[in-house]
Image (cartoon, rainbow, N blue to C red):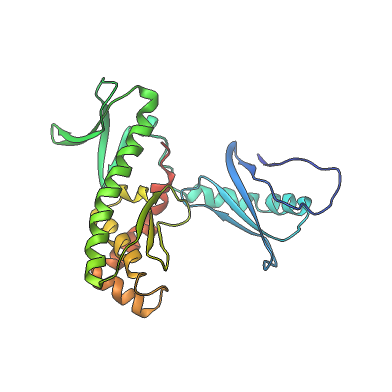
Amino acid sequence: MFGFGRNSSRHSTPRPTPRPGVVTVNGRELPLTIRENARATRMTLRIEPGGQALKLTIPKGLPGREIDEFLTRHHGWLMTRLARVPDAGPLAETRTIAIRGVDHRIETTGKLRGLAEETEIDGVPVLMVSGSPEHVGRRVSDHLKRVAKRELEALVRMHATTLGKPVRAIAYKDTRSRWGSCTSEGNLSFSWRIAMAPDFVIDYLAAHEVAHLKEMNHGPNFWATCTMLCPRTKEAKRWLKQNGSRLFAVTF
């Protein structure tokens, strides 16, 4: 079953401001963000990393009925592509979480307060989480944010020192379209979900954004700088291409 949720209109006039909607594919509801682009000549539909949302870019002033028709025509395409997206599932069901590339079993401490703590039980990596069961997801995501901050800040400082470039600020977000960003002013931003990736991938992400402090592009000089900072750059890029969607698919 496929549908597009939006406010209906009796007139086929161009909508001045697209509103977010919901696309339903085989009973699964996915948030849809519609963005107008004055330079766009056609509609472009994109599945966000992790398969948790959709993004539709449309020419400015496009009538709503044309959007509906476009989405209906692409029903089969959505079904096929979404079937390929790894389904990591909610933590409440999997009860495991990867931390720096190592799967940890999630156990509750029975206490109401306290930070999550990594340990081992009978040789098995475990993340001990406090709080009530309904707060486990938030406690785990908070732990990943702390891990990301600790690991990335140390790596960014090291790589920035190597290049002799200053870093103005570092921010951590739950982005769905990119792992990191860098501005010409020296502001870096990272997805804290990278804390689930192996150490060498975290190192690559830090090196990638720091390299932009020297080369604000993705040309040969940029990649040479990135590889100099992180020799496993190619391997890390492959890992993210193969596994990145799985990290975005985890729901907390």
Residue 162: x percent and y percent?
A: 22, 70
Query: Is residue 140 among what the camera can see?
Result: yes
Q: Position of residue 237 (x, y in %)?
A: 34, 63
**Horizontal relation, residue 175 to residue 232: left or right:** right
Give the residue drawn at x 58%, y 43%: 31
The part of the image, by quadrant, that contains residue 61 is bottom right
Q: Is residue 227 above or below residue 117?
A: below
* Whether residue 230 can be seen here: no
- Give the quadrant of the C terminus: top left
Residue at 35% over, 57% down:
169
Figure check: 126 above or below 79: above
Q: Seen from this angle, which residue lies furthest right?
A: 11
Residue 118 in the figure: left or right of residue 22: left
59 horizontally vs 189: left or right: right
Farthest residue, direction bottom:
220
Location of the N terminus by quadrant is top right
Question: What is the number of callouts on the image?
Answer: 0
The x and y percentages for residue 178 are 44, 57
Residue visible at 27% across and 72% down in the picture: 227
Q: Is 99 placed left or right of 217 in the picture?
A: left
Which one is nearer the viewer's eye here, 192 or 27? 192
Residue 147 % position (x, y): 27, 45
Name the residue at 23% across, 56% down.
Answer: 154
